[in-house]
Amino acid sequence: MADKNGPDGTGETGRGKQHETGIRDEDLERRRRELEASLATRLPNRLEGKDDAKAGSAAGYGQAVKLSSEFIAGVVVGAGIGWIIDRMAGSSPWGLIVFLLLGFGAGILNVMRSAGVVAEFGQGDKSRSGRDDSK
Amino acid sequence: MAADKVDPIHQFHIIKLIPINIGGYDLSFTNSALFMVATVVVAAAFLFLTTSSRSLVPGRLQSVSEMAYEFVANMLRDAAGTQGMKFFPLVFSLFMFVLVANLLGLFPYFFTITSHIIVTFGLAILVIGTVIVYGFMKHGLGFLKLFVPKGVPLVMMVLVVPIEVISFVSRPISLSVRLFANMLAGHITLKVFSGFVVSLSALGAVGVAGSILPLAMAVALTALELLVAFLQAYVFAVLTCMYLNDALHPSH
């Protein structure tokens, strides 16, 4: 009985192991797919970038204009707000200095957002789920 | 001699066609206004005429109209969800206006209205105005949550919120600058290369042979401009959809 049980047990564990690896593969596959899906929702602009890339020779040029306009807009708006505050409060040049720096930050944020490195306004992942609910 | 003849900026000059002056404001009907009217007429006439037959199996032109409709509808649904479809008329009008204006501008001697920043800025302000008005109408002060990212420590808020606000305000500017800069740069490049052809071919046989190169460049650039005209209309519409999405779902 013990003899029989021994090989039987090993056989079962063997088969069990095989089964387990099968499950593990499936599990891994599922998790990988989930990760892909969540990454896709987290980086919404990547897809747009791919579309641009498909467009061929205009891709680099279009991307350059897009990113530079984003950056310039951030800096210009920051400087503009600072200048207006200075004019209204007479605090020249401090408003300009502070808001120019903030505008620089906003420009960088714009560029990173449009390159798809940073999530959209108010964190991309949550926004995706919120929108799925609304659908 | 050729320099004043081939002036790459000349094509963007505004010419008063019918001077109108009301209450000190210059409201003249200019060549820019003429081409805006032409753009609207061409876009509307194209859509009306091609969809008038309403055949079940669309002809070539009808399927172009239907493709444009489905293209914009899918874009809007992807970016802003089914709720966003209430903005479909706005987005479709903007897309068709920019697209037709860009394409009309490619004709020689035609005026490109999207190469003037005030026009594209007006369009961008319309978009952002819609986002702000609708956002406050629907969510009230909750719309301001757009500027407060979740999971940021309170101390950092002092820095993060102004940056987010500036980032939001810079959107209409980057939207308009992008369209304007693309059209302006493209048309100037095209004009400069065509100018080379003219001034080189005035130099005799060697010049004529040499002018083949800029001519080939001008032909290639025209194809590129055709692509850019479509791409910029597409980008403008896509970004409009994304901003409208913020108005629909500001708090996450």
Image: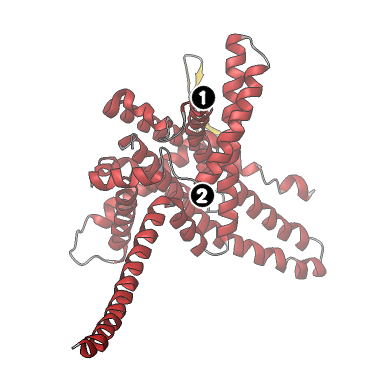
Q: Are marks 2 and 1 in contact (CB under 8 Å)?
A: no
Q: In front of the other: label 2 or label 1? A: 1
Q: Position of residue B54 (x, y in %)?
A: 19, 58
Q: Secondary structure under badge 2?
A: loop
Residue A117 circle label: 2
Q: Along the line of sight, which residue is nearer the eye, B61 or A12?
A: A12
Identify which residue is drawn at 35% across, 43% down. A126
Q: Position of residue A91 (x, y in %)?
A: 64, 11
Inspect the image, locate mark 1, and give the three-letter code of the amino acid beneath it: Val
The reply, left or right, for residue B110 in relation to residue B69 is right
Question: Number of callouts in the render?
Answer: 2
Give the amino acid at mark 2: Val
Rendered position, B37 above or below A35: above
* Residue B204 falls left or right of residue A53: right
Residue A84: quarter of image: top right
Location of residue B220 with respect to B9 vertically, above or below: below
Q: Hey, which residue is sitting farthest front in the picture?
A: A2
Residue B158, which numbered label?
Answer: 1
Question: Label 1 is found on which chain of the structure?
Answer: B
Scheme of colours in the image: secondary structure
- Residue B49: x and y in percent read 28, 54
Residue at the image position 49 percent from the left and 38 percent from the top: B120
**Rendered image quadrant of residue A83:** top right
| Secondary structure found at label 1 | helix
Residue placed at 20% from the left, 67% from the top? B57
